[in-house]
């Protein structure tokens, strides 16, 4: 396998820098080859001299680059040797130069290396001397004195050194001998010397043979016939003074500049002394200087006739023949050497090669960016070149060897700050004045994934209407990445989290390209009010970088639930029958409509009203509380009345529900209603126990008042710092709009219960437990969450409680001594319950909502300002602290833990359950429970 390549001379010189900086090695090999060797001759063992294995040459893509664009050699990659590609002719390659060398470049990759190879072409005596003319005709006067010299033509031998002309020989002659003179440039000049006076009458013509011999082995020779005509008269030739002269001349002098005037004399007179001048040329330089210089044949002045360039040739050898006009003509020879003086007339040349663009922005300092070569054709200081680049660039120039530089990084690169650089390389020589040139190239910086995507905000807020169709656009997150290309191509995704019961991806999806968040299914405000959607953005770099943000999606309520009348609960199309005393006075509470709405806010604000009737009804419905009262005195003759009560929410559009109530005035209507409630009567033992509890509570209250005073004083001191005071507790900021919280002890007794709400002003309100004045025992009523009793049992329990509240105080039942929660009655999620604990208490979601509606109705009554809450007959024993803003959306925990303070009803009757006598223990627990609550 052979490898070879010919490129312009600049490229190999520039490629040399690549292997020398900074890590690869650089070597120079030297070989010699005789010029007569045939193609295929092995010049040298490259693999051995380079110290590499032969089999690695092909893998490393060894290439041969020769200067001058000529191909003389090739590389045998299989053998690792340098071979001769064509026969060399030293005389054609180097002419008469004393040395002849060919310069090659060897380029190897992986790693990239460049080696310089110098091959000396050795001269072989393959040329015989040759005279310019096969015959030389000379003329000499017969009066010539012995010692007269007749110059002969110089033979030419293209070979050099010992193979060039060594000597001349002249055939034997009685009158002539051969003399050899050595010229200043080493050329041997033969001359025929007259040794004996001539006699033209005896021998008018002499025939001699001049032989030129070289110094080769074997010796080669060339001959010329010399014919000498013996003339009469003109016996003095022109003579140059001095015969050899030297002139210094600046290059680029104007055309026509006088170089010199030859000084030639001829002792003869007349035509024999009239001299004419002419250039004497030879095969060595046939007419080369005649194109640059002119010679005046009459005066002997030599002038320039073309621009001279030191870079082309630094000196010229001029031979002049001076011939007189005698007969026979005689001639003399003058030799002139013109040496040029270099001036700074050439600007430096910059050659860029192997520019590594783009370069990675994480390239280490010292990374080679480009190889730069400079050349100045001037000599001396005029040819000394310096390279410069701008100091603010993160690059520097490193010299590899003469006139070759490497551009390397000098500091870190950051594509985000500069995506590329216009690098201007300026070359200045050391001449006077200096000459400069510059070359600019653009270096692009390649991106590296070194920047993570950034969200415009780590937290965002979005709103979406409940019941929106799947695929509804919720929000669009936006992120940016200062990188480019695939490193800046972003994709968005949602990270599943444990914030909701189901994975967040079952609620929302995101467009991975533009970051738009869509709903996957319709959302239900009543189930989930807010979602935390963690969003991750990731670029496409390697390795990929990412960042996260959180989008809080708030679900907006929609009026999609109509009011639900939980009391009275009657089948659809049926009516609720209510008996009242026939002599009920105006203001008498007939019954109370209790309704709930699963929506929130305005959508859950309920109002009660009577539908228009053809007859005037002696009843009215409280708009907020839903209480049906007697509006005017009833007449004895009146029969039953049919009322259609409509419950309407405040949503848009408004939704409603209605119930038909038939009120029948009866003489014994109230007594029958009281009997229908099978409530246990309080025992004297329970009354005494309650008395003990009251005494204990009073004692604890006194101590609490003292502690409260101390705490209040401390809280007031901190008031200026922006604290808000709720009861005796201190907190930062404003209380939520409403709250309802309770805390239970592990054994089932209540420890603390607190209900808070916001009024029409921005000031927060906070409430703790209260007691109704109508209940002397101040019993608590607890509601157990989520069990499996029927709705009918719940309604019966409510009627029983309502009947008890409407009865006189002496008819109140004794407090239950066993009011502890069973395991299934404790606050929490719905659990199992045995049959004997079921009773008449609500234990499913619907029944719990009914009791919530009771509390809401009482709150609405208090807002109207005309209710008898807090102690009047017919109330539910709720204090007036429940304002109009106390709505269901503020108390999401009512379904799990609701109580009605002040009621004389008990959770279950111990006597009815298992006849266990646990009064002392129950009393202690009740006292302890109230103390803890206090």
Image (cartoon, grey):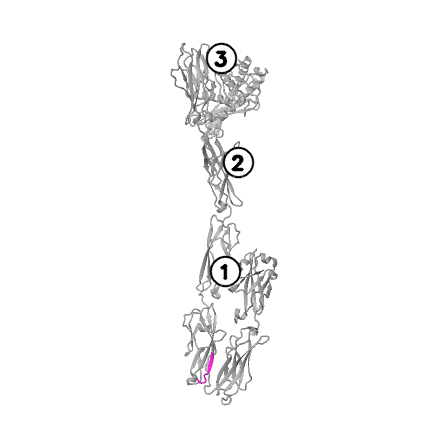
Tell me: residue 532, above or below residue 201.
above
Residue 622 image offset from top left, x and y in percent: 42, 19
For the residues marked 1 and 3, what is the alpha-carbon distance in whole angstroms? 116 Å
Residue at x-position 55% and y-position 13% = 685
For the residues marked 2 and 3, what is the alpha-carbon distance in whole angstroms? 57 Å
Choose the circle earlier in sequence order: 2 or 3.
Answer: 2
Does dot 1 land on a helix, a strand or a loop?
strand
Does dot 2 land on a helix, a strand or a loop?
loop
Q: Which residue is mark 3?
A: 674
Q: Which residue is mark 2?
A: 496
Task: Tell me, for residue 373, which label it has, or none.
Answer: 1
Q: Nearer the viewer, residue 285 or 225?
A: 225
Residue 699 image offset from top left, x and y in percent: 52, 19
On the image, which quarter does residue 218 sit in? bottom right
Does any portion of residue 447 appear in the rendered image?
Answer: yes
Span shown in magenta:
326-333
């Amino acid at each position: 396998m052979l490898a070879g390549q010919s490129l312009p001379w600049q490229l190999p010189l520039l490629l040399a820098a690549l292997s020398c900086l900074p890590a690869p090695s650089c070597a120079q090999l030297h070989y010699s080859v005789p010029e007569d060797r045939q193609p295929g001759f092995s010049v040298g063992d490259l693999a051995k001299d380079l110290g590499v294995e032969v089999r690695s040459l092909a893998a490393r893509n060894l290439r041969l680059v020769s200067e001058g664009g000529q191909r003389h050699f090739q590389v045998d990659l299989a053998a690792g040797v340098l071979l001769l590609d064509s026969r060399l002719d030293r005389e054609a390659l180097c002419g008469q130069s004393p040395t002849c060398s060919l310069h090659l470049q060897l380029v190897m990759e992986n790693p990239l290396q460049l080696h310089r190879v110098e091959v000396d072409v050795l001269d072989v005596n393959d040329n015989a001397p040759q005279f310019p003319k096969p015959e030389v005709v000379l003329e000499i006067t017969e009066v010539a004195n012995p010692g007269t010299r007749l110059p002969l033509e110089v033979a030419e031998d293209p070979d050099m050194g010992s193979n060039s002309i060594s000597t001349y020989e002249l055939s034997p002659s009685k009158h002539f001998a051969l003399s050899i003179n050595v010229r200043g440039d080493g050329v041997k000049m033969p001359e025929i010397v007259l040794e004996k006076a001539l006699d033209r009458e005896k021998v008018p013509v002499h025939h001699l043979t001049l032989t030129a011999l070289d110094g080769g082995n074997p010796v080669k020779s060339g001959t010329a016939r010399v014919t000498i005509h013996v003339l009469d008269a003109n016996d003095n030739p022109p003579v140059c003074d001095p015969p050899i002269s030297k002139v210094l001349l600046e290059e680029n002098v104007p055309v026509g500049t006088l170089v010199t005037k030859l000084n030639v004399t001829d002792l003869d007179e007349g035509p024999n002394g009239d001299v004419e001048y002419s250039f004497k040329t030879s095969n060595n330089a046939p007419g080369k200087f005649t194109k640059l210089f002119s010679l005046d044949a009459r005066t002997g002045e030599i002038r320039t006739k073309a621009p001279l360039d030191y870079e082309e040739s630094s000196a010229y050898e001029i031979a002049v023949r001076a011939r007189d006009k005698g007969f026979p003509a005689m001639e003399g020879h003058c030799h002139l050497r013109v040496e040029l003086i270099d001036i700074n007339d050439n600007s430096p040349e910059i050659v860029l090669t192997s520019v590594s663009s783009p370069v990675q922005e994480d390239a280490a300092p010292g990374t080679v960016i480009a190889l730069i070569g400079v050349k100045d054709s001037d000599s001396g200081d005029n040819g000394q070149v310096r390279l410069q680049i701008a100091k603010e660039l993160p690059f520097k120039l490193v010299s590899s060897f003469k006139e070759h530089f490497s551009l390397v990084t000098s500091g870190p690169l950051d594509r985000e700050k500069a995506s590329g650089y216009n690098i201007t390389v300026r070359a200045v020589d050391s001449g006077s004045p200096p000459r400069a040139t510059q070359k600019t190239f653009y270096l692009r910086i390649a991106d590296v994934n070194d920047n993570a995507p950034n969200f415009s905000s780590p937290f965002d807020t979005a709103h979406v209407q409940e019941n929106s169709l799947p695929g509804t656009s919720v929000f669009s997150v936006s992120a940016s990445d200062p990188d480019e290309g695939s490193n800046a191509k972003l994709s968005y995704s949602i990270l599943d989290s444990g914030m909701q019961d189901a994975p967040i991806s079952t609620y929302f999806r995101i467009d991975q390209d533009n970051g738009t968040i869509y709903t996957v299914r319709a959302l239900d405000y009543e189930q989930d009010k807010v979602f935390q959607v963690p969003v991750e953005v990731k670029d496409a770099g390697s390795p990929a970088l990412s960042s996260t943000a959180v989008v809080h999606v708030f679900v907006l309520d929609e009026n999609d639930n109509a009011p639900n009348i939980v009391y009275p609960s009657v089948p659809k199309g049926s009516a609720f029958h209510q008996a009242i005393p026939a002599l009920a006075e105006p203001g008498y509470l007939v019954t109370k409509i209790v309704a709930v709405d699963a929506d929130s806010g305005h959508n859950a604000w309920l109002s009660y009203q009577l539908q228009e009737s053809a007859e005037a009804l002696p009843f009215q419905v409280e708009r907020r509380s839903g209480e049906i009262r007697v509006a005017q005195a009833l007449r004895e003759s009146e029969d039953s009345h049919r009322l259609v009560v409509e419950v309407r929410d405040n949503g848009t559009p408004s939704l409603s529900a209605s119930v038909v109530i038939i009120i029948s005035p009866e003489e014994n209507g109230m007594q029958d209603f009281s009997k229908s409630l099978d409530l246990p009567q309080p025992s004297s033992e329970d009354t005494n126990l309650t008395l003990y509890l009251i005494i204990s509570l009073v004692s604890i209250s006194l101590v609490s008042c003292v502690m409260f005073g101390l705490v209040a004083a401390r809280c007031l001191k901190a008031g200026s710092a922006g604290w808000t005071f709720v009861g005796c507790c201190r907190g930062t900021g404003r209380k939520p709009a409403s709250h309802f919280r309770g805390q239970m002890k592990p054994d089932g007794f209540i420890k603390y219960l607190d209900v808070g709400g916001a009024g029409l002003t921005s000031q927060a309100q906070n409430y703790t437990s209260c007691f109704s004045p109508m209940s002397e025992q101040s019993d608590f009523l607890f509601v157990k969450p989520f069990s499996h009793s029927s709705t009918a049992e719940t309604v019966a329990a409510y009627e029983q409680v309502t009947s008890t509240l409407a009865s006189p105080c002496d008819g109140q039942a004794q407090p239950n001594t066993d009011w502890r929660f069973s395991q299934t009655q404790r606050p929490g999620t719905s659990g199992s319950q045995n049959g004997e604990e079921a009773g008449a208490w609500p234990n499913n979601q619907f029944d719990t909502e009914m009791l919530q509606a009771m509390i809401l109705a009482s709150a609405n009554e208090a807002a109207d300002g005309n209710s008898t809450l807090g102690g009047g007959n017919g109330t539910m024993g709720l204090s007036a602290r429940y304002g109009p803003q106390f709505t269901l959306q503020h108390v999401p925990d009512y379904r799990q833990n609701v109580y009605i303070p002040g009621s004389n009803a008990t959770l279950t009757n111990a006597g009815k359950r298992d006849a266990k006598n646990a009064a002392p223990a129950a009393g202690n627990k009740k006292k302890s429970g109230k103390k803890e609550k206090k």
